[in-house]
Image: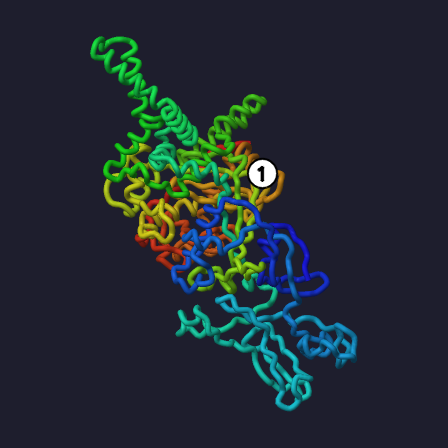
Amino acid sequence: MAFSRGQTQVLYGFLPGSVFEHDDYGFCRVTGVELREEGVNRNALFDALSDVLYQRQDESLRAGFADPRDERNRNGYVVGRPTNVKFEPYPSLLECRSCGRVYRLRDLVGRREGEPGRCPACGGVLAQLRYVQAHNCGRLEQLHYPRCRIHGASYVRLLDTGRVTSARWLCGACGGAEIGRLRMTPCNCAYSNRVAQNQWERGLKTVPVTDPALHLGQVVPFVNFDEQQEGQLYNEPQTLALILARTWGVLSEAVPAVLERRRSRRARGAENGEMDETVAAMARQLEEIEPDNPLVRQWREQQERAAHPPGSEAVDRVRALLGPAAPADDAAPPRQLVEHVAVLDTLRTTDAPTAAGWARARGDLEGAEGLEEAVSGASRDLGIADLRVVNDFPAALCAVGYTRITRDPGRSILVPFPPDDLENKTPLYVVAAETEGVYLRLDPVRVSSWLVENAFVQGPSPATEEEAWAWLYGVAPGLLQNRWEPEYGEGPAVAVRTLLHTVSHVLLRHVEWSGFGQNSVGEYLLPGALAGVLYANRYADTKIGGLTALFEQRLGTWLTNSASSGRECVYDPFCTDEGGACVGCLHREHNCPSFNGELSRAALYGGPTPQGESGNLSLGVPVIRHGYWENARTYPAAV
């Protein structure tokens, strides 16, 4: 059996291994999803896949996946848009709504007596038993179907008390005598071997088929920039230094434009190589005779420009700021910095001065002043140095696999989807579209000061923006590293990622001013640039404009409410005492690529920190005494 569903519907409700309720067939299990291959930015996709895999530090918890960091393994995956959904009825244990007898579907198939869908004993309506068993390894089983030693399976019933511990199987012919209880069968999987001393974790859990924990699809975002255009940012010398200069505000010109001018100059030089040598020889001879000749001076200026290609001053400034730590000319830029520059230099963005100018042009002076005051207050009180609207953010979602019982990377095995083609390749289901978003970047001077004030780093904090960027480059190299690299988990890097991630979640909890629900807006963080994009999870040909309207008309209200309400949690004081991150304040049900790791309200308002529990690397300090937003005040909102 099969049907078609919308692409995002498939990603969030009809992935292989999931159970859903069909209008005609009752509860069904998805056995496969057909896909149509589609071109996307494969490097970005496989980097995102690598990141989600290596959130599971134990290799046994991701053993079903070929390592996508090795380009040779990438041929073992097939990437495309989901189309038709294949399914089968599941579970196949049926219960009579009248007499309570339980049957296996296979025992009823082929019977001549009785009507289909009716109890053979009393004629009552048969319905699927609403329970199955699942384990953290991804295993899914139907309930064990017992038999009475005297009457076999003819009178078996389930006494459903609503609690697994007290539910039991009965035999109706034996006067309701108990013939068994719901089993907590131990699973002999890799996860069980890791928790051999924990009987609860080893056993299969009995859960309703409607429980969301039965199938937790792992959907990760990536930015689907044009792969050819992006590749140009990797293939030029000094690209990393140029990208750092652009990120740090040293370079005002767009990086792609600088690189294009460099390529053009090289091309002209190659075409005119022989002529240039002849001209140079003539110029040297003239220089010996008449050093101050205007043609000689012009030739010298040309030589000087040739020795210093476009962007050289910015590169030299970065080298001066970093000293011995400056990157080599052939150093490859980290993907997140490339993506940050691509957001700034290749997408259509609108900053606050531009939006305020538009408001004034249409006579909305109050709105323009409110927007300007909101941006000024964000910088002054919240340490947000840059805010702008992104009109064409190329967001993409990829469903890579699923877990059962929990999303916790330390307590579940990530299971790949079964191959659905003759080549036996692992499918990755992708949905991509251009959408709207809000870009934000934290103030590097404020972040540096926050690190020093809370003893994440010793010594004085830098005073200028350029110095702060260079200082962060040195004290928190893990901000630019991948999850599997050595300095990723060092205290300063964890602290900055936690700060940025917490700011993102607090803002997302109050994004309803845009008309979107908080789970309808995703986040894409670029910690090496202290930046992120909050984007609409809308994968259609049209844009609603909700985030654009939020930025232009309600920015102050959004920021004020977020900063004020972000302190609160319905589970306080317990939540604050345990690190300040739970379902009552910061955790999101969907659209968090880090599965709610590296979050703490203490980063913004001070307090005890999470002490390295599951999903969080240790911040290295027990208490944050100075929150990044501890002195935040309210300010007029744009109206």
- The x, y position of residue 291, in whole percent, is 22, 11
Place residue 323 in its image quadrant: top left
Q: Is residue 15 above or below residue 171?
A: above
Say if 309 sits above or below 461 in the image: above
Q: Quadrant of the N terminus?
A: bottom right
Rendered location of residue 265, percent (x, y): 38, 25
Q: In the displayed image of the protein, which residue is found farthest to the bottom?
A: 150
Query: In the image, what residue occupies the spot 48% across and 67% down?
Result: 137
User: Left of 135 or right of it: where is 238?
Assistant: left
The local crowd at label 1, few if under 14, some if 14 to 19, many if 20 or more residues have their Cα within 10 Å, is some
In the image, taking residue 165 as reference, residue 105 lies left or right, namely: right
Expressed as whole percent of the image width and height from the top left, the position of residue 474 reads 28, 42
Which element type, helix, strand or loop, lies under badge 1?
Answer: helix
Count of numbered tags: 1
Q: Is residue 392 above or below residue 589?
A: above
* Residue 475 seen: yes
- Residue at image point 36% right, 47% down: 481
Of the pair 153 and 62, the residue shown nearer to us: 62
The amino acid beneath tag 1 is Gly
Residue in the picture at 48% in, 47% down:
42
Give percent across and percent down for residue 229: 47, 36
Taking depth in this image into account, of 78 and 636 the one nearest to the observer is 78
The residue identified by callout 1 is: 546
Name the residue nearer the viewer: 524 or 563: 524
Q: Which residue is at the front of the view, 217 or 597?
A: 217
Residue 51 visible in image: no
